[in-house]
Image: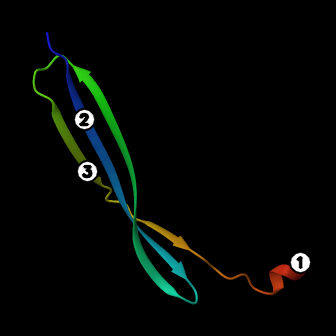
Amino acid sequence: MEVGLDAEYYMKIVSSEFVHPLWGIQSFFEFSHRENIVERDLRVPKIEFKYDFDPISLRHIKKRRGFLQFLV
């Protein structure tokens, strides 16, 4: 019996925004990826690609502290 190799690639994509008081809003995408190579008892090797677009977006907000917070 022949052993085949299966490759699985998975990528998760999340949209993000960085809000800065001086520079405004900058949009970008963050991603994470994973790959698995598995031995199977198949005669035909296969490659599988999976993408996951997350419906929730992240917003990073940079705020300036007031001068009175340093005096306390």
Q: Quadrant of residue 31?
A: bottom left
Up-down: is 30 above or below 47? Answer: below
At mark 3, the secondary structure is: strand
**Residue visible at 25% across and 35% down in the picture:** 7
Task: Check the image and name the residue furthest to the top.
Answer: 1
Residue that numbered label 1 is attached to = 72
Mark 3 neighbour class, 10 Å CA radius: few under 14, some 14 to 19, many 20 or more: few
Please state which of residues 67 and 28 is positioned toward the viewer in this rendering. 28
Residue drawn at (19%, 40%) of the image: 48
Q: Is residue 51 above or below residue 16?
A: above
Q: Nearer the viewer, residue 58 or 68?
A: 58
**Colour mapping:** rainbow
Image quadrant for the N terminus?
top left
* Label 1 CA crowd tier, 10 Å (few <14, some 14–19, many 20+): few
| Crowding near the residue tagged with mark 2, few <14, some 14–19, many ≥20 C-alpha atoms within 10 Å | some
Residue type, mark 3 in image: Tyr
Residue under label 2, please give it: 7
Q: Residue at x 37, y 60 (%)?
A: 14
Q: CA distance from mark 3 to mark 1?
A: 50 Å
Instruction: Give the residue number, with chain letter if any, for mark 3.
Output: 51
Residue 55 locus on image (x, y percent):
31, 59
Of pointers 3 and 1, the one earlier in the residue sequence: 3
Judging from the image, what secondary structure is the residue with disc 2 in? strand
Vertical placement of 6 versus 14: above or below? above
Cα distance, mark 2 to mark 1?
Answer: 58 Å
Please state which amino acid type lies under the numbered disc 2: Ala
Sooner in the amino-acid sequence: mark 2 or mark 3: 2
- Image position, residue 19 (x, y; %): 51, 79
Distance of label 2 from label 3 (alpha carbons): 14 Å
Give the mark, 2 or 1, whose residue is nearer the N terminus.
Answer: 2
